[in-house]
Amino acid sequence: MAMQQIALLLLLLAAAHGLSVAVSPTPIINTTCAALAHSPNVTVHVDYEFCVRALSADPASSSATDARGLAAAAASLTVANLTSTEHIIADLVHNLGRCLTDYREINGMVRHALDDIRGGRGADASEKLLQVAKANAPAWYDLILIEGDAKRNPIDQENHNADFLSVIASGIAELMLHSHG
């Protein structure tokens, strides 16, 4: 059942992005989607093309003989989509939680390095900042998030900035250390 839902979601995504789906719409799908797109009695506007592509890609919709069958098929598609989205969100939250824990630790190290810089302890600051820069943690978080179920990283730019800034801070601390030594 799960594989069927995944295959169906892939077909729906292809249909939603204008890729051709080889199934022809049935007359009930055409009529129902036209009614949804043009009826003043429908509260939420439905895009006719999307409706036809989405329902035509679903075998249950294509075999429906009346509005009740189409409604059940559309509701089933909605459940499959929401279930898939829940799974992606849960994975994203889990992975972002891992990133958050490590970012807090890294932030603490950089704050201590800042205190060391302000206190004239350049060697200590340099060591801490070098550890942060060498850890390259933001790149790991990119990988964790991209390889997760979401297949995207919502904090991509922030990760790159953190990586570049940590390398800059580490380099400057090293320059300071060598200029005093």
Image: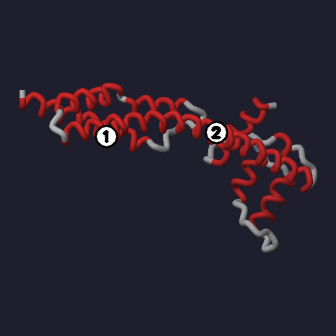
Dot 2 lies on which element? helix
Q: Residue at 82% of width from left, 50% of height from top? A: 75
Residue extending farthest bottom: 40
Q: Position of residue 129 (x, y in %)?
A: 27, 32
| Residue type (three-letter) at the residue carrying disc 1 | Arg
Q: In which quadrant of the rendered image does the N terminus lie?
A: top right
- Disc 1 target residue: 111
> Badge 2 is on which residue?
90
Q: CA distance from mark 1 to mark 2?
A: 31 Å
| 169 to the left or right of 106 | left
Question: Given contact means CB atoms under 8 Å apart, are the residues at marks 1 and 2 in contact?
Answer: no
**Percent position (x, y) of residue 121?**
17, 33
Q: Residue at x 36, y 37 (%)?
A: 108
The answer to whether residue 7 is above or below residue 17 is: above
Picture coordinates of residue 48, whole percent (x, y):
72, 59
Quadrant, the C terminus: top left
Q: Position of residue 173 (x, y in %)?
A: 18, 34
Q: Secondary structure at mark 1?
A: helix
Residue sitting at x 72%, y 66%: 45
Q: Is 118 left, or right, of 80 in this rendering?
A: left
Q: Which mark is residue 163?
A: none
Residue at 75% x, 52% y: name it: 52
Question: Does 72 sit above or below residue 59?
Answer: below
Say whether residue 123 is left or right of residue 6: left
Mark 1 closeness class: few <14, some 14–19, many ≥20 residues within 10 Å: some
Q: Residues within 10 Å of mark 2 (few under 14, many from 20)?
A: some
**Which tag, 1 or 2, sits closer to the chain's start?**
2
Residue type of the residue flagged with mark 2: Ala
- Dividing the picture into quadrants, the one containing residue 59 is top right
